Image (spheres, grey):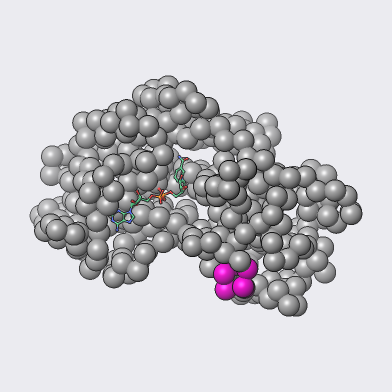
């Protein structure tokens, strides 16, 4: 029996695993891919900045100790009664469980959206988006239908805006390669709320808007997507938009395995944890990252971000090891260091601590956060390797 079983190799799961690896605490990590990918950089992979597989790292390379075990499988069910995680390839009993299974797209029941849109969810879907856009440019050359050159991104949160930023930098290269006039390409961001990027201050939103608009994106706020059909987006109170590429970045919810297993969850499907990141329903289960519903001192749930997930994973490594050995657990305290949104390759907006940053400076800090994460995950070796590959400070 695996004493400690970690499900999911995202930010929280990898931090829990590498933390336990460092102290030689035996565990088994199960993930559906044999690599960990950098979710916060998927827009770069989708938008042609660097080769998609550069945004991954083999999980086995991150685990050094013989006591650390990795199994590639997809978990489909949690059997809490029997203390077993059920995968497609087998069953995995546990004494202590760490659930860090990430998120799935939130479609809000909008008809046709799941069937007819692409999502930026993992490396496979980033590659799918990239290839799809390239194929639409090819199709335009074949039949001259301008619909192929319209890209709709639904949702102007951080994911949508970072993706649009990447696309406006990539499209001119694609146009050049295919001999297509840039003015024929229409990149539309469609957002239901009155503003883009609610996470940043109003003046920074204006900067983001200006940068993206100047590079040729159309930002349509106060425009709600209500239905999607093949190649057509229906919005409230306006004409439908025909588009060759429809990408949905309108929200996320926790992996449904937790609610299916009967854990206490919030409206986004996240399972409630106590101060030590243990499930309130089972003190042998730790939950972290986007699957955890953790409230700060003011009773506010923490957002599902990589920053929080990384810190949760580090705390879980310590706490699960303490639990195994009967030591006192440590309460989790998130240290929020700010938010940064890239706007393509050379610009960004956000705040570092309480200081607002924009333009090249924001972009510089964004690249620096990559380096920080490589260091936390894989030390000098990973930092040297990945910094050479996907960090661009111009
Ligand atoms: P989000 O929920 O933050 O944003 C989704 C946007 O879609 C919202 O603005 C919403 O109003 C809009 N929307 C929803 N329904 C719509 C509809 N029917 N029509 C048009 N617009 C609609 O989702 P996200 O951007 O994927 O972010 C998810 C989480 O991940 C957040 O907590 C975010 O902070 C985090 N994240 C962080 C970073 C970063 O730190 N750089 C990057 C990406 C995501």
The mark tally for this picture is 0
Task: Please name the residue shown 29% across and 36% down the image.
Answer: 169
The foreground one among 116 and 244 is 116
Q: Is residue 88 left or right of residue 219?
A: right
Quadrant of res 219: top left
Q: Is residue 138 visible?
A: no
Residue at the far right in the pictured view: 326
The foreground one among 394 and 224 is 224
In magenta, the rendered stretch is 258-263
Relative to 320, is 348 above or below? above
Residue at the far front in the pictured view: 298
Q: Quadrant of the C terminus?
A: top left
Task: Please name the residue shown 24% across and 63% down the image.
Answer: 226
Q: Look at the image and say whether residue 259 sits in the magenta stretch.
A: yes
Task: Please name the residue shown 58% across and 43% down the image.
Answer: 298
**Residue 140: x, y in percent?**
16, 54
Q: Is residue 82 left or right of residue 135?
A: right
Q: Look at the image and say whether residue 108 sits in the magenta stretch.
A: no
Relative to 190, is 365 above or below? above
**Residue 122: x, y in percent?**
47, 55
**Residue 71: x, y in percent?**
69, 63
Task: Please name the residue shown 37% across and 45% down the image.
Answer: 157
**Residue 75: x, y in percent?**
61, 69
């Amino acid at each position: 029996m695996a004493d400690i079983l970690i499900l999911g190799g995202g930010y929280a799961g990898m931090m829990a695993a590498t933390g336990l690896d460092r102290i030689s605490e035996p565990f088994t990590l199960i993930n559906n891919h044999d690599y960990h990918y950098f979710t916060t950089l998927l827009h770069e992979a989708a938008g042609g900045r660097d080769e998609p597989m550069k945004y991954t790292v083999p999980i086995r390379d991150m685990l050094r100790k013989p006591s650390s075990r990795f199994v590639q499988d997809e978990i489909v069910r949690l059997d809490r009664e029997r203390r077993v995680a059920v995968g497609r390839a087998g069953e995995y009993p546990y004494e202590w469980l760490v659930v860090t299974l990430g998120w799935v797209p939130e479609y809000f029941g909008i008809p046709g959206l799941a069937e007819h849109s692409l999502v930026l969810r993992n490396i496979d879907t980033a590659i799918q988006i990239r290839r799809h856009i390239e194929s639409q440019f090819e199709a335009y050359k074949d039949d001259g239908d301008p619909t192929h050159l319209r890209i709709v991104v639904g949702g102007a949160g951080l994911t949508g805006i970072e993706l649009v930023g990447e696309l406006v930098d990539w499209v001119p290269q694609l146009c050049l390669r295919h001999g297509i006039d840039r003015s024929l390409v229409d990149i539309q961001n469609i957002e239901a709320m009155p503003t883009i990027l609610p996470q940043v201050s109003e003046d920074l939103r204006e900067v983001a808007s200006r940068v993206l608009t100047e590079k040729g994106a159309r930002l349509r706020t106060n425009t709600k997507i209500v239905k999607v059909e093949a190649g057509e987006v229906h919005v409230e109170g306006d004409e439908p938009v025909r588009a060759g590429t429809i990408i949905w970045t309108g929200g996320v919810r926790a992996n449904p395995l937790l609610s299916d297993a009967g854990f206490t969850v919030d409206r986004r499907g996240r399972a409630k944890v106590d101060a030590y990141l243990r499930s309130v329903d089972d003190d042998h289960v730790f939950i972290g990252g986007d699957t955890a519903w953790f409230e700060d001192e003011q009773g506010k749930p923490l957002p599902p971000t990589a920053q929080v997930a990384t810190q949760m994973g580090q705390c879980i490594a310590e706490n699960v090891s303490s639990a195994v050995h009967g030591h006192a657990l440590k309460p989790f305290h998130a240290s929020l260091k700010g938010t940064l949104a890239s706007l393509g390759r050379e610009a960004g907006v956000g705040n570092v601590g309480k200081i607002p940053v924009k333009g090249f400076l924001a972009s510089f800090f964004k690249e620096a956060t990559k380096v920080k994460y490589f260091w936390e995950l894989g030390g000098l070796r990973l930092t040297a390797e990945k910094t050479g590959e996907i960090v661009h400070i111009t």
